[in-house]
Every structure is written in structure tokens, then in C-alpha cells.
């Protein structure tokens, strides 16, 4: 089964680094170049094991995924429940560990997948590895930029202040923020 991985070190402690990775719309759109639309489904208001999300990618593809692990501030894992026809299986795991310097975090993001149909898998897996490798590098670079963005950091800090048994107030989550960066020209697209 193919696996793609990307690693970055960010200048925030693990608890905050994890919280940035779990920000929701509209703040998430400031840093996540992969996501064009994302929201919780089934009435959920915050991430957690068993919670499902709907995501529309920048490619226009949609996926419903489910949190299979949620252990702040160290890791989160998701699996595809419903998605593009060419994925037989897709899963992702993000890990956060203390970095080499105080108040830094090493973020390691990994995706695993299996393409279908089986007879096309040898070619599809190579193409998938290339495309997903490019996307995960862009996405983690956006995440690193988000860890330096005061608007994103403020939203992440607010989520840390929300007790786990209290749903996030939708009015607070939807509070207007500065406009997200223009993605029509993105230097991260230069890698191929």
C-alpha cells in the first residue's frame, strides 16, 4: 500500500500546533491550500473520535472522512468513509512531537491509500503517490505558514480555551476574519 509523508518544524508548542491543525472554516481556508470546503456532518460541532467531516478539495473532489483517533496534542487519524471512485482506501495520520528547540513542534503528516480497480493499481498507485506527495507538501507548507499567522493562532488559542464538553459556539466559529490570502497565484504551486 503506497504511503506519502511530509515533515515540518513549526515555532509553536505542540498543544498549539495541534490546535492549528484542527481549525475550522473560515479560518482553515487561510492556511490549508487543499481544502475548498470543509464542515462537520451528523450534527457534530468539533473534532473527536467517530466524528465525520465533509471535504471538497481544490481539485473539486469530495470525501467524507471519519476521525479514527483524536489524541491532542500528539496525534489525529482519519479514514475515508466515502470518496472518489478511484480510492479503494484512503487514510491519514498527523503526529505532533516536541521539536529540537523549546516551544517548537515537529509535525509529521502521512497518507496511505489503495487505488482501484486492481488491474490498474500498478500505474494508479504511482500516479497517486506523485499527486498526493505534491499535495501533502503543499498542505504542510500551508500549515507551517498558518502556525505563523496571528489570525489562525488566535482561533487555535480560542479552541484551546473551549472546554471539551462544550460545543464551539457557531457564532464564534463563523466570526469574520481577515480575507484569506489570494490562492490564484500560489508560490507552492511551482513545484510541479
Image: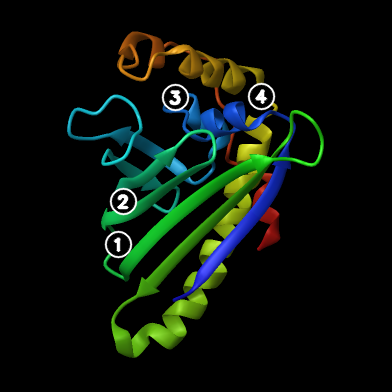
Q: In the rendering, which numbered label is found on residue 108? A: none
At horizontal 52% and vertical 63% (from top left) the residue drawn is 132
| Tag 3 and tag 2, C-beta contact below 8 Å | no
- 191 lies left or right of 23: right
Question: Which residue is disc 2 drawn over?
Answer: 62
Q: Which percent across, then down, holds residue 79?
A: 34, 55
Name the residue at 43% across, 54% down: 59
Residue 76 is left or right of residue 148, and the answer is left
- The alpha-carbon separation of the residues under discs 3 and 2 comes to 18 Å
Q: Residues within 10 Å of mark 1 (few under 14, many from 20)?
A: some
Dot 2: what SS? strand
The answer to whether one can see residue 8 in this image is: yes
Q: Find disc 1 in the rendering and name its residue.
A: 84
Q: Secondary structure at mark 1?
A: loop
Q: Are marks 3 and 4 in contact (CB under 8 Å)?
A: no
| Looking at the image, residue 185 lies above or below residue 113 | above
Residue at the right extreme of this rendering: 101
Residue at point 32%, 33% (across, down): 39
Q: Would you place residue 8 above or below residue 3 in this image? A: above
- Which of the labelled discs sits on residue 26, or is there none? 3
Q: For mark 3, does the 10 Å Cα neighbourhood hold few (<14), some (14 to 19), or many (20 or more) residues?
A: some
**CA separation in Å, label 3 and label 1:** 24 Å
From the image, tell me which residue sits under label 4: 149
Residue 77: horizontal and vertical position, in percent? Answer: 42, 49
Image point (45%, 85%), residue name: 123
Amino acid at each position: 500500500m503506497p504511503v506519502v509523508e511530509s515533515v515540518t518544524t513549526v515555532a509553536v508548542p505542540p498543544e498549539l500546533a495541534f490546535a492549528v491543525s484542527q481549525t475550522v472554516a473560515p479560518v482553515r481556508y487561510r492556511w490549508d491550500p487543499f481544502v475548498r470546503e470543509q464542515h462537520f456532518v451528523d450534527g457534530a460541532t468539533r473534532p473527536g473520535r467517530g466524528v465525520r467531516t465533509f471535504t471538497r478539495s481544490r481539485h473539486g473532489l469530495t470525501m467524507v472522512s471519519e476521525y479514527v483517533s483524536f489524541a491532542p496534542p500528539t496525534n489525529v487519524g482519519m479514514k475515508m468513509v466515502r470518496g472518489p471512485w478511484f480510492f479503494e482506501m484512503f487514510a491519514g495520520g498527523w503526529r505532533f512531537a516536541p521539536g529540537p528547540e523549546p516551544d517548537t513542534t515537529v509535525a509529521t503528516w502521512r497518507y496511505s491509500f489503495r487505488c482501484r480497480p486492481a488491474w490498474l493499481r500498478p500505474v494508479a498507485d504511482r500516479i497517486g503517490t506523485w499527486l498526493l506527495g505534491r499535495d501533502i507538501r503543499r498542505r504542510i507548507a500551508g500549515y507551517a505558514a498558518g502556525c505563523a499567522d496571528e489570525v489562525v493562532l488566535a482561533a487555535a488559542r480560542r479552541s484551546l480555551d473551549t472546554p471539551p464538553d462544550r460545543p464551539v459556539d457557531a457564532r464564534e466559529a463563523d466570526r469574520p476574519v481577515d480575507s484569506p490570502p489570494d490562492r490564484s497565484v500560489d508560490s507552492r504551486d511551482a513545484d510541479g
